[in-house]
Image (cartoon, rainbow, N blue to C red):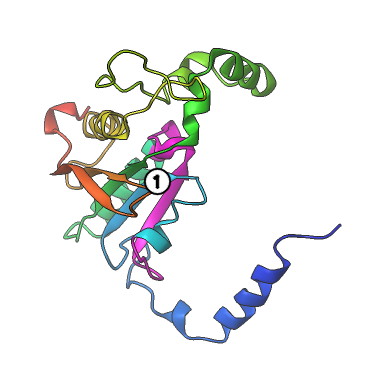
């Protein structure tokens, strides 16, 4: 069976012939730019392209819609704990959550699609329904031409920033920010500036 990876393996060999892989941070869990980026799995939203990320500059987690999932919380909690215990002087990192326009997670707002996916995979349908967030600013019809609710990535990113800020497992020494990437203009807009998790949220 042919593999779509073959051309990329050629690129890998070219990469291996450079010294790029040696330009790593002194401590791998503290990337050069001090960033943990959460963004969408959409192929149009690769932060290496729209943010110009280079090797070793950031930790990147990609999920459906760029949403903060339990796995993302676990990763953030782990890395925060590693820094606190292995490099207590820091530097600490910023978690930059980036959602985007024209997001395919809109499909999960369709009840029939969502139910079918839940039945096929065993995922909790209620949890799936929480991924897309309708745009409260849309007046009249809240659906687009495809019949799916219009999403407001600024609202979803605010919700996810709050989810991280309020989680008691997250280090209070990191910061969290929220942004929206516009797939049409290519620009990133900051919605929530860097904030630290609240100490009162700690267990």
Q: Nearer the viewer, residue 138 or 113?
A: 138
At x 38%, y 35%, the residue is 68
The percent coordinates of residue 92 (x first, y second) are: 21, 55
Quarter occupied by the C terminus:
top left
At x 47%, y 77%, the residue is 21
The percent coordinates of residue 76 (x first, y second) are: 34, 44
Left or right of residue 126: residue 79: left
Q: Quadrant of residue 155?
A: top left
The percent coordinates of residue 149 (x first, y second) are: 42, 20
Q: Quadrant of residue 114?
A: top right
At x 27%, y 38%, the residue is 170
Q: Nearer the viewer, residue 29 or 23?
A: 23
In this view, 198 is above or below 134: below
Q: Nearer the viewer, residue 130 or 42?
A: 42
Residue span colored magenta:
51-72
For the question of whether residue 176 can be seen, the reply is no
Query: Within 10 angstroms of label 1, few (less than 14), some, or many (20 or more) residues?
Result: many
Extreme-right residue of the structure: 1
- Verify whether residue 63 appears in magenta: yes
Q: Which residue is mark 1?
A: 39
- Verify whether residue 143 appears in magenta: no
In this view, 159 is above or below 44: above
Left or right of residue 147: residue 162: left
For the question of whether residue 193 can be seen, the reply is yes
Secondary structure state at the residue bearing disc 1: strand
Q: Quadrant of residue 193?
A: top left
At x 18%, y 27%, the residue is 201
Left or right of residue 138: residue 111: right
Quarter occupied by the N terminus:
bottom right
The percent coordinates of residue 111 (x first, y second) are: 54, 13
In this view, 96 is above or below 136: below
């Amino acid at each position: 069976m042919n593999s779509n990876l073959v051309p990329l393996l050629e690129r890998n060999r070219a990469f291996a012939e450079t010294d790029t892989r040696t330009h790593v941070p002194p401590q791998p869990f503290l990337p050069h730019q001090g960033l943990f980026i959460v963004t969408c799995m959409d192929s149009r939203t690769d932060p290496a392209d729209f943010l110009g990320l280079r090797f070793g500059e950031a930790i990147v987690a990609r999920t459906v819609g760029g949403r903060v999932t339990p796995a993302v919380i676990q990763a953030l909690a782990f890395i925060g704990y590693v820094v606190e215990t292995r490099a207590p002087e820091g530097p600490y990192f910023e978690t930059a959550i980036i959602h985007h326009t024209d997001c395919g997670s809109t499909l999960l707002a369709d009840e029939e699609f969502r139910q079918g996916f839940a039945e096929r995979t065993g995922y909790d349908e209620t949890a799936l329904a929480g991924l897309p967030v309708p745009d409260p600013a849309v007046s009249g019809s809240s659906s687009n031409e495809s019949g799916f609710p219009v999403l407001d990535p600024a609202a979803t990113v605010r919700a996810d920033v709050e989810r991280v800020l309020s989680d008691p497992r997250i280090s209070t020494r990191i910061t969290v920010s929220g942004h929206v990437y516009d797939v049409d203009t290519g620009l990133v807009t900051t919605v929530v500036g860097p904030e630290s998790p609240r100490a009162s949220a700690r267990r």
